[in-house]
DNA sequence: AAAATAAGTTTGATATACCTAACTATCGTT
DNA sequence: AACGATAGTTAGGTATATCAAACTTATTTT
């Protein structure tokens, strides 16, 4: 409904990058977009025309590039998804930062609004609900040494926890 | 290391579908692959040649299709990722089954072995660690009525939990 | 302001993954 | 064994997203 998107992952990536460049440099330049996308300058030009035709950016040949309102809305949505997924991957699953960023960069195109909102709630729940214990993360770290369940530590922990519960 | 994959998401989808057809029908037929992929029969033929060239399937024109060992290994890995992601989406984030399946179908190509293993550990932790409380899922359901945090219920729950903790 | 450099564009080509429609092989009936 | 239906293939075409290299415009530097 809100974001009846239907644009390719690729277009979404462009929008996300343009949003970021616009923020840091006021305006997005073709050369920087090419660099961020890891492609040639020539390829950017055609994509800018494409984005412009779709009403997602304002673009004149040899001019600067800025997002239209519609483009900005989409870019911000994608950016939001990116941040949330990256947070989950790095803070909850403890995937290292660079990898988390790379995976988030691809997952952000795959999840919809509802799913991402549920992920937000879930993370919020983990962070705040006292039933989980404030130290759920620590408990999980104990549970998963180096990413693999550390059976010995875990068994001891379970015993302690269970016996202290009466 | 193990799965230095480098095949496109598309190829991975074909392999996954062929694996499933092979299981249910002993052998995969072009027509069924087309149906599952939602594409025309003609498109399947070229892809079968492609997969065959890459050594992922055994294929003779007009013959049946079976996965090679390498193809099977990849297909099984993808299938595993699919199941795990779907489980997380539907059971933890409570995304409805059909949607969870669709998202998993795309996410499965995006995560690597390490990340999926960590997700497995995390889900396992949620399911088994007594520190979380056996009813963490119930707590979460209370927390998120209809996917949105139900502040009132949640506050009550927090009070109770906190006061019963001493 | 002219020359040099940098940025942006154009053109023609490639790869992937599709399509449609015509054609061919195979299978199941009778 | 012949016929019709079903399955599979081929050929030519489309869309997307990329490339390299030649070219044009804009910006610096002197």
Image (cartoon, coloured by chain):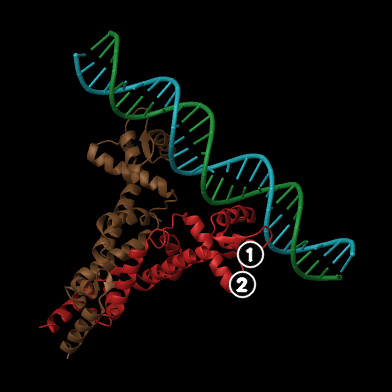
Chain colours: A red, B brown, C cyan, D green
State which quarter of the image contains the N terminus of chain B: bottom left
Tell me residue C4's x, y (percent).
Answer: 82, 62
Neighbour class for label 2 at 10 Å: few (<14), some, many (≥20)?
few
User: Which residue is tagged 1?
Assistant: A29
Relative to residue C2, is residue B152 depicted above or below? below
Residue B39 in percent (x, y) is at 38, 39
Left or right, B105 with respect to C6, comes to left
- Residue A134 position, x and y percent, is 27, 83
- The quarter of the displayed image where residue A118 is located: bottom left
Examine the rendered structure and indicate whether residue B146 appears above or below residue B65: below
SS at badge 2: helix
Foreground residue among A62 and C26: A62
Residue lying at 51% horizontally and 57% vertically, measured from the top left? A11
Q: Is residue B142 left or right of residue A40?
A: left
Which type of secondary structure does the marked residue at label 1 adopt?
Answer: loop
Q: What is the spatial separation of the Cα atoms under label 1 and label 2, in whole angstroms?
A: 9 Å
Q: Is residue A89 visible?
A: yes
Per the rendering, the mark at residue A25 is: 2
A115 vs A45: above or below: below
Corner quadrant of residue B154: bottom left
Q: Is residue B70 visible in the rendered structure shown here? A: no
Q: Are marks 1 and 2 in contact (CB under 8 Å)?
A: yes
Do pointers 1 and 2 mark residues of a single chain? yes
Q: Chain of mark 2?
A: A
Percent from the top left, x then y, of residue B145? 23, 71
Image quadrant holding the C terminus of chain B, namely: bottom left
- Out of B52 and D9, give the one closest to the viewer: D9
User: How many labels sit on residues?
Assistant: 2
């Amino acid at each position: 409904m809100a974001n009846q998107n239907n644009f390719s992952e690729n277009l979404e990536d462009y929008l996300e990058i343009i949003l970021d460049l616009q923020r840091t440099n006021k305006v997005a330049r073709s050369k920087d977009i090419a660099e961020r996308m890891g492609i040639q300058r020539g390829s950017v030009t055609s994509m800018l025309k494409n984005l412009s035709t779709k009403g997602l950016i304002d673009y004149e040949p040899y001019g600067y590039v800025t997002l239209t309102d519609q483009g900005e809305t989409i870019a911000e949505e994608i950016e939001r998804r990116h941040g949330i997924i990256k947070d989950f991957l790095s803070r909850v699953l403890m995937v290292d930062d660079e990898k988390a960023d790379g995976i988030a960069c691809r997952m952000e195109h795959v999840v919809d609004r509802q799913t991402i909102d549920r992920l937000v709630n879930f993370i919020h729940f983990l962070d705040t609900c006292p039933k989980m214990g404030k130290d759920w993360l620590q408990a999980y770290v104990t549970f998963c040494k180096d990413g693999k369940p550390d059976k010995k530590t875990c068994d001891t922990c379970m015993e302690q926890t269970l016996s202290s519960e009466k």
